[in-house]
Image (cartoon, coloured by chain):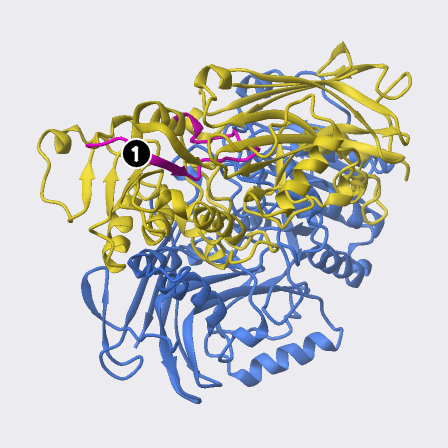
Chain colours: A blue, B yellow
Amino acid sequence: MPPRLLLAGPPWRGEHVVDGKWVGGLLLQLRWVDSACTGGWAPTPASLAPQRDEGAKLARTSARMTPAMISRPSVVALGHPPSTGQTDIARWMSPPAEPVGIRSVPESESRFGLGELTRAALWIWQDRVRTDAYREAIMLHQKFIEGKVVMDVGCGTGILSVFCARAGAKRVYAVDASEIATQASEIVKANNLADKIIVIHGRVEDVDVEEKVDVIISEWMGYMLLYESMLPSVLFARDKWLKPGGLILPSHATLFMAPITNSDRYEGSVDFWCDVYGINMSALVPLAKKFASEEPSIEIVGGENVISWPFVVKHIDCYTFTVEEFKSITTTYKVSSMMLAPIHGFGLWFEVEFNGPAESCSNLSSDSSPLDIIQKKRCRASDSTVVLSTAPEDEPTHWHQTILYFPDPIGVTQDQIIEGSVTITPSEENPRCLNIHLECS
Amino acid sequence: MPPRLLLAGPPWRGEHVVDGKWVGGLLLQLRWVDSACTGGWAPTPASLAPQRDEGAKLARTSARMTPAMISRPSVVALGHPPSTGQTDIARWMSPPAEPVGIRSVPESESRFGLGELTRAALWIWQDRVRTDAYREAIMLHQKFIEGKVVMDVGCGTGILSVFCARAGAKRVYAVDASEIATQASEIVKANNLADKIIVIHGRVEDVDVEEKVDVIISEWMGYMLLYESMLPSVLFARDKWLKPGGLILPSHATLFMAPITNSDRYEGSVDFWCDVYGINMSALVPLAKKFASEEPSIEIVGGENVISWPFVVKHIDCYTFTVEEFKSITTTYKVSSMMLAPIHGFGLWFEVEFNGPAESCSNLSSDSSPLDIIQKKRCRASDSTVVLSTAPEDEPTHWHQTILYFPDPIGVTQDQIIEGSVTITPSEENPRCLNIHLECS
């Protein structure tokens, strides 16, 4: 069945009804809310791990979704509500005896409740694409890291700290606000690195160390880069603790976006209801469209689903980016369809690079041409840098891609121009939530 | 690496430390809690649909987990907290104009909030194994159904009501407490069955119809049959509305259990941490074991994972079963291992049959021998009945299997006897939660 068009006029030029209002151009006003906005939790079967992700077995067994870590694990199990992070000023005022190598700072504003990042880490550290990229980046910069002081922001199990110590770092401050710090400390000891790695249990904003650091390393990226990301903590650490000329890993991050086509998904989601066992269930089609389009979908799509060159929503230079810039990210775009196809929505994904302060391979912006992006891929292939990509054409990661589906597909012809704007802003209600405003005209 | 044993003495005979207490035999005290116990919700990526389930595409796009329907959908998407079911006594007292074919009863104790079952149904009706079984059962009993009155308890989209109407039912009362009743009514009209199917929006416990019914049909089964099941509503409808000699579909349900081995899963979940990129992370092993074993896991296992004949935990005859019997289901078991293998836990699954009041194919009990079970399979193969099976050796359904993992595997030899008891009781705190107490000695 051919895709039904929402448009009255020519594709992308007509007027659309969205939420009962006539607007010029397509408008998707998405609000991505995590449970921290409302509290609570919900259990889910454990067997739903992404089949294409290597090493997801553990997740299917035990990882659980809990508040405040929505961007981290994506597999959950039926179970008890998680413990909540406890205010622990008392311990700060009068610290009890603790395992060697762990320092405590107040947990009162801890981002993660007891055990939550622990559970997340159990899954997240099985994403080999990501871990391999970090390990390669550390090897690439080994000469810089040797004999230097490193801070690992949000260290989790401490795996990046161990990589840095093994690469010759003189000292590593491994900081995490979650209870995972306890396990990180044990792992450090079990690997005979307690003389090099100091695990600090607390928020990086509360940490007090005795020296400035030469290197900041962090795995801070959330879904579509920015959802529930720890970037603000990395920027804080940079401004407070990084020596001039220091190294930040990753150094650069780029959020991409492109129109996507996904007829199999759309037909299975929406058209399915037109005939179910010979029964006309099209009464469910409006609901199916609503559910498909009212919120971003985290899923894996392939390069074949992407119907134009991607455009750059934001390029972040971690050496210079500020928290202020994070408050509203907006760009216009103009891309050309590579084929005759129905557009079912837009996909978002990101890449991060691991460069020194002066060596960004190519600082992409929303003005970047397709040639810039090809150049970037060539640069990457030359091994002069390490890139961790979550693009549809690359090996899947636990971040998948983020898809903003339209209620109805919109047909485009080959070489047809698709243009508009996209704005991403943290929710005023909760800065960890994102509003996404997408227009096409 | 060989599985590590928890036991001090010979397998299954020693004393075990569980939760810091020495107990004779293995003890798994599981408490399955749904969010209705605590309120709240948690979003999750949408792409985690079980890859082996046919037609799960919609779910990956749009279905969402919400409170009070934990047993229904198993795929969720990031999004807003669901609307909650609203008390609507006012409408009952003074009903407004409503679509033809819908009657309202009070929603004050509605099991499903606004839109929740709707979302669930969007996924659940794509489970073809289940829907095919119901359709075949209706065809098998077509002569009985023709010209008769049917009640569909928890009708959802109304698909079973439509099947019954098409099979010749004189009248069908399609009852659902969820807002899905609105869509069910539209579907009934779109299929020109408004003269036969009366959609009633309300709890079956509150429904008032003008006649007794000849047939009760319901898709009431939850995970491991009983978790969040609607069986009590079916029994209520039977006692209040079913004529003597009437038909109940399904008529019989059997909950099975067997020891399972799953080394791939265990090694990926637990042993994985012993060496991660050359780093000793065994500090995480106790956590991994805890997470793997502290709650039931909903996942798909295969027949090759089952290491003894299953035993019957409970056989339910829907014609005679009472709510009282549901309050504590307990059985002893004694099975023989078919191989030398590590036992990683126990699996639970169920079958339902669609028989008339006097024709149960084989009333299995916990005393049933393997021969009884073979006989049952033969009976099923003879086409004299319809069986919907969620067993590991059969085609996967959205119910998957439910696995109770041990913290540590326990080795058994071929023909070794495994015996003990299992007790399943609804939680006192919330009857929709289950406590599972499992012992082996």
The residue drawn where x is 44% and y is 29% is B231
Residue stretch rendered in magenta on the structure:
B210-232
Is residue B224 in the magenta section?
yes
> Which quadrant of the structure image shows residue B283?
top right
* Residue that appears at 89% across and 17% down: B8
Specify whether residue B31 is painted magenta. Answer: no
Q: Quadrant of residue B384?
A: top right
Q: Is residue A10 left or right of residue A132?
A: left
Which residue carries the number 1 mark?
B213
The answer to whether residue A261 shows anywhere in this view is yes
Q: The C terminus of chain B lies in which quarter of the figure?
A: top right
| The N terminus of chain B: image quadrant | top right
Task: Check the image and report above or below for A384 versus A85.
Answer: below
Q: Taking A131 as reference, is B7 left or right? A: right
From the viewer's perspective, is residue A307 above or below residue A217? Answer: below
* Local SS, label 1: strand
The answer to whether residue B345 of the structure is visible from this angle is no
Q: Nearer the viewer, residue B68 or B106?
A: B106
> Going by the picture, which residue comes out furthest to the bottom?
A415
Residue A12 sits in quarter: bottom left
